[in-house]
Image (spheres, rainbow, N blue to C red):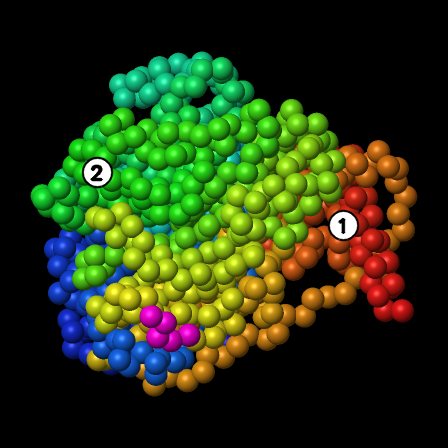
Amino acid sequence: MHSIRIVSGRAVFSALAVFFSLAAPVFAARPPADVDSARLAAAAREPSNWFTGGRDGNGTYHSPLSRINEKNVDSLGFAWEYDLGAPKRGQEATPIVVDGVMYTSGTWGFVYALDAATGKLLWKYDPEATQQAARNPCCDLVNRGVAVWKGRVYVASIDGRLHAIDAATGKRVWVADTVVDHALPYTSTGAPLIAGKVVVIGNGGSDIGKTGVRGYISAWDLETGRFAWRFYAVPAATGPQEHPDLEAAAKTWDPRKPEFHGGGSPWDGLAYDPALDLVYFGTGNAAPYDLTQIGPTQFDALYTASIVAVKGSTGQYAWHYQTVPHDEWDFDTVQKFVLAELPVEGKTRQVIMQASKNGFFYVLDRRTGELLGAKNYTYVNWASGIDMKTGRPVLTETANWHIAPKNVYPSWAGGHTWMPMSWSARTGLMYIPVIDASNVWVDIANNGGQVKYIDGFFTVGGIMPDTAYDAAGLARLYGALPPLADLSRERDGHLVRELIRAWDPVAQKVVWEHETSTGARGYDGGTMSTAGNLVFQGRGNGELWVYAADTGKVLKVIPTGSHIMAAPSTFEVGGEQLVAVQAGYGGAGITVGPTPASSAASRYQNVNRIIAFKLGGGTVPLPAPLVVPPFTEPPAQTTTPGQLTKGETLFVQECSRCHQFGPSITPDLRKMSPVSHAGFKDIVLRGALSGNGMGRFDDLLSEQDADAIHAYLIDEAWKGWNAQQQAAR
């Protein structure tokens, strides 16, 4: 697999000219990326294209194509692949295909244009992102896709800049800095949204640092990149608010110190209804998680954990629905939305639907925000249900982790997270990738352990129990925790599994399901459905599974050797239907622990690539096997028990969000080379490896702190080395 980068604008233009001259007449009749409101509204009449991340303006992840169908899908096989290159991190974008050209994004916010028939590179765009910004995302250097509109491609880079790119040449048209304060850990990993005359983007950062950020969405003129409007998800801590709706929201917060920015980051899940001119966005968790740090009152803390609608032309507030008032469980409401028409009590309603992170499936009137349905699509124990009169969850005793550590379902990873779900109006079913797992929420600041703060969790710990969970072993770090036997008793020994569930949003029930992973979080992929009565989903174990959309019957399983998290897309070129998926392990999985043994990334090299499939295709080429390097003899250790304890604590607090002991997408720091040992402080404090995503930490760690962390890692390296030597005898 070889990437080809065309650096000359003239070469790019020539390549595209040749491509379009050889393409079918329907392609030649249009310039590249010729998508507008009329064409998007009639997307069903152009089944060969995949116009947006979710294919159409409603975000359905459903294709009208049926050349590949339940009768012939058994012959589906390899068509082509494209190597996205380094760094080999998580891949979460769904490729867009317009008139035979594929557009997608990768790490940092790189953009690729490919010949959709062959996978040949047409151009590649480097956003030249600020390397230090790689420290800001909670969950890897990911990017969830691009927007394509009227000859341009729009992408947000990891440093929060919004880019407009000429679709014919790959040249930058304009770039806008969407970050209001670069001193705070703002980042953008979601796909932009086209809304009338503007392009809208959100941001992340609610979880990062000791105070998080103040989340918002912002809109920028499509043509010029000029700022249009901004809507903050939470009120300012002090001073006048930007608009009256924030004045009202401020009354739902305890008075807070300026350093608590509030959170609410809308890091994914934007949608737009052009007829209503409404932009819909979900908001993230409050910052900090423990709202008692701000005040004693159980106020709602608007607009965190909410679905919000604003006018696309002005950013003016229209309505909101808060899924989790006073959220203290990291139940973001940023999962992707689907717009549809559903029968509700004998009437057809225009609705917006979401399988929220908190475990409930919401159906709202998208004009007014009226709650029409809210049932749990997975096991939930933090609430007994949703009060349909008030719209509020009915909390259980399990929800209160302040009095003692509690095992809460679903976990901070969500019953459903960013992986897209797919809606088929043909079957009336939503196909949801479900994570049926819990976490032990613990107030680490007051629970007696040596760790008092964890980057990404503030003064709270969200410990995911699995077969490696050891309450006694963790007690030194986090304080007293419930034993594994108590945690598994609730679910008859079951702790972790992932599923695909076909959900009927009208009857509010599961129609069919399959367990996709068990025992460890594989972070299986998003779903795609088609008119061929098919549902596609990739798995963490490297397989692409195809089901009958109506019954759930397994029709085809294709091994790829690559961990698949993103949702596939499908398109037609030259009369042939293809399916494509972007593959590569990373994302939130790196915050849980080492790469699961069930993951393809534990058996094969984590090659980031796009894989395309066609009828009559061959066997997918497998990446090279993963070779886990052995321990080499570490440097001599000269330290004290006190320094080791300090180093371990600092490692858990500041480093464990990205670095694990064992196979992962980031280095196992017990196995550093002599060069890395010698330059440890240059790497940690001065950003010597910032180009690899390892920013400097001199704003958080002192020279003495770095020495303590280094001593702890050397100590752990000696443990590994000695165990390896003992096993070899």
Q: Which mark, by number, is residue 372?
A: 2
* Image position, residue 562 (x, y; %): 50, 68
Judged left or right of residue 465, residue 686 is right
* Image position, residue 122 (x, y; %): 36, 70
Tally of marks? 2
The image quadrant of residue 419 is bottom left
Q: Earlier in the sequence, mark 2 or mark 1?
A: 2
Give the structural element (helix, strand or loop) at label 1. Answer: loop
Label 2 is placed on what type of residue?
Leu
Q: Which mark, by number, is residue 309?
A: none
The image quadrant of residue 32 is bottom left
Label 1 is placed on what type of residue?
Gly
Q: Which residue is mark 1?
A: 679
Magenta-colored span: 553-557
Q: Nearer the viewer, residue 9 or 519?
A: 519
The Cα–Cα distance between marks 2 and 1, rounded to whole angstroms, is 59 Å
Measured along the vertical axis of the image, is residue 270 above or below residue 643?
A: below
Main SS of residues in magenta? strand
Q: Is residue 74 visible?
A: yes
Q: Nearer the viewer, mark 2 or mark 1?
A: 2
Judged left or right of residue 267, residue 67 is left
* Image position, residue 234 (x, y; %): 38, 26
Q: Is residue 198 visible?
A: no
Queried whether the magenta region covers residue 630, the answer comes back as no
Instruction: Name the residue located 85 percent from the left edge and 69 percent from the top edge.
Output: 728
| Label 1 environment density (alpha carbons within 10 Å; few <14, some 14–19, many ≥20) | few
Queried whether the magenta region covers residue 556, the answer comes back as yes
Judged left or right of residue 679, residue 587 is left
Instruction: Name the residue located 46 percent from the left edge and 70 percent from the top edge.
Output: 543
Q: Nearer the viewer, residue 506 or 640?
A: 506
The C terminus, quarter of image: bottom right
